[in-house]
Image: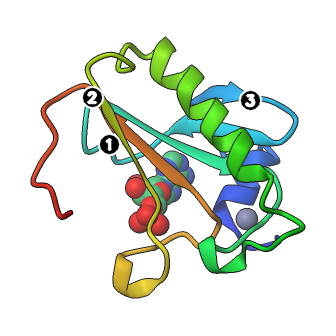
Amino acid sequence: MENCIFCKIINREIPSTIVYEDDKVLAFKDINPVAPVHVLIIPKVHIKNVMDLNEQNLDILKDIHLAAKKIAGEMGVADKGFRLITNCGEEAGQTVFHLHYHLIGGKELGPKII
Ligand code: AMP
Ligand code: ZN
């Protein structure tokens, strides 16, 4: 997508600190981390958010979760714990409209919303 900042990161038009990549998924450090580990995991295809998922593109969630497991292991949060969060839509606080999962950990996380 032309004006999508995360598509530009995928295309190396904007720099980022990449921590994981395969043919379907890219993961990079959040520019404004809220915890010692804060990685964004995104599909390489432009999907707006959870509401843009369908039977055809849903397989990407498998790849994203497998990537999350690898990243959590490599970043040392697999045992102590981490959160995997996606914000869907404006009232949820989504600011970048390219599906992304925040992998957050490395400290006691709180407060719990749910
Ligand atoms: P959300 O608010 O859930 O849509 O998350 C968007 C996230 O993208 C925020 O945590 C931002 O800090 C992060 N972000 C925005 N631009 C960049 C960028 N160029 N590189 C890395 N992270 C970014
Ligand atoms: Zn995009």
Whether label 2 touches label 3, CB < 8 Å? no
The C terminus - image quarter: bottom left
Relative placement, left or right, of 73 versus 98 is: left
Residue beneath disc 1: 33
Whether label 1 touches label 3, CB < 8 Å? no
Look at label 3 and name its amino acid. Glu
Can you tell which mark lies on residue 21?
Answer: 3
Q: Residue at x 17, y 28 (%)?
A: 107
Residue 13 visible in image: no
Whether label 2 touches label 1, CB < 8 Å? yes
Which residue occupies the foreground of this view, 79 or 47?
A: 79
What secondary structure is found at the residue carrying circle 1? loop
- From the viewer's perspective, is the residue at label 1 or at label 3 nearer? 3
Residue beneath disc 2: 36
Where is residue 26? Give x, y as percent. 70, 39
Q: Is residue 18 above or below residue 5?
A: above
Which quarter of the figure has residue 87?
A: bottom left
